[in-house]
Amino acid sequence: MPISKITLVALGSTGDCMPMLALAQGLLQAGYQPTVVTHEAFTDLVESYGIEVAPLAGDYRAFFRSQEGQRFLRGEFLPWEQAPQFAKNLPRQLEQVLAAAQGSQAIIAGPLALWSYHVAEALNLPLIVAASLPIVETGLFPFLGFGDIPTSVNPVQSALNWASYRLVDVLGWVRDRPTLEAFRERHQLPTLPPLGPRYRAHHPKQLQQVPILHLYSEAVIPRPADWAQSSHSVHVTGYCFPQASQPYQPSPDLQNFLAQSQGESSTPTIALGFGSMAVADEQAMLQLLLEAVDRANVRAVLLAGWGLTQAGQLTDRVYAAPSIPHDWLFPQVSAVVHHSGSGTTAAGLRAGLPAITVPFFGDQPAWANRLTQLGVAPPPIPIQNLTAQNLAAAIKQVLSNPTMAAKARALGETIRAEDGVNCAVSIIQAYVDSVGW
């Protein structure tokens, strides 16, 4: 029996790529031939896991460092406006996924690549959506409103919450319609209704029941009861983390720095970093963080992925590195300061760490609020309000709160006991087998 190829589209930042990489690993172990279509910046990362990779236009980290990216982070684009760089990349991305998915049995797409629907239709392939945040409409909370989940809502609020998902869907279609309709015309696909594919009278057979996998733990975001009425097959699998092929080898300097934090009387060490996010003035941000560490009387490993070029021991209290695997570092620190991106949030929760959140944009405020509601983080500090004083105060608050630490440890134990990858792969395998492509 020939090996079945499955194409996974990982558009976005590192936090968007890693769960797809975990699914690819699981599919490979299950006997499939996965190909991850992702940005050139992640090629080495994907190949280091033994997974085939195909190119995808765009570089989110470079984008966030650009003037256009800074405008995007500040929310200066309207919901129906596309950032010019995103608009420029989309036609090429569609054709790249089309080329990569030739001969596949299915396409798996993240929430930033839902346009893969049109590629799947062009190739007559089933589509599976894998998201690290809730994307299926519910009356319990609005789109990106999962940070503060109520115990109940009245009928009017429920209807408004439900409608918010449809509005986002329509706005996204209006924004990208010219490019998507041009792609459909090139590949002899029918024109879609003015409000998008959701409102077409008849969906192609292979796209009628799209499974939607939510790659997080129900202990973090409980499954809304009204998802049972969805027209799609909706799942919550548990978090999906890739398994490194080789153990991380830290530098002797980093090992020595962390060794100084051992012992009950030692100064606590935290992890600190903003992932792929960029800041307008990197040196000013560095000075703010160094001052906050001093004020909080802690030591810190600074994950400098957001643009800092220095590395090594910056001060007696701070060691900087461009990249350290979260699963290696986080179990060795007492708390983590982060931007509350989905990937870093997941890694911190798995490690059982309390957090100090500094959200920038998008789903980050929702994740930050969710950690606060779960009792494992103080109220978030939006990036525009960040100062050395309030960051230091939040760090002190977290490290002096045994209840918060206990809740984080308990949540970490629950998450580590789950097996999101195998759960997701089982669902994918059953669906692919059922459609018979």
Image (cartoon, rainbow, N blue to C red):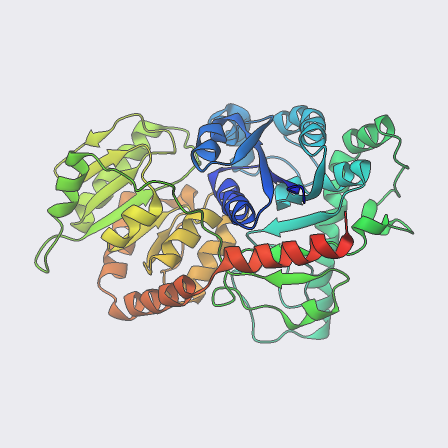
The answer to whether residue 341 shows anywhere in this view is no
The answer to whether residue 17 shows anywhere in this view is yes
| Residue 295 % position (x, y) | 18, 47
Q: Observer-nearest residue: 284 or 416?
A: 416
Task: Say which quarter of the image contains residue 39.
Answer: top right
Q: Residue furthest left?
A: 265
Task: Say which quarter of the image contains residue 285.
Answer: top left
Question: Which quadrant does the N terminus fall into?
Answer: top right
The residue at the point 30 percent across, 51 percent down is 330
The residue at the point 70 percent across, 56 percent down is 431
Q: Observer-nearest residue: 65 or 429?
A: 429
Is residue 18 left or right of 3 when viewed as pictured? left
Q: Observer-nearest residue: 105 or 270?
A: 105
Q: Observer-nearest residue: 237 or 423?
A: 423
The residue at the point 48 percent across, 55 percent down is 367
| Residue 172 % position (x, y) | 72, 42
The residue at the point 74 percent across, 35 percent down is 176
Q: Is residue 421 above or below residue 112?
A: below
Is residue 344 left or right of 172 when viewed as pictured? left
Task: Say which quarter of the image contains residue 142.
Answer: bottom right
| Residue 423 % position (x, y) | 55, 60
| Residue 394 % position (x, y) | 29, 55
Is residue 418 left or right of 413 when viewed as pictured? right
Q: How many marks?
A: 0
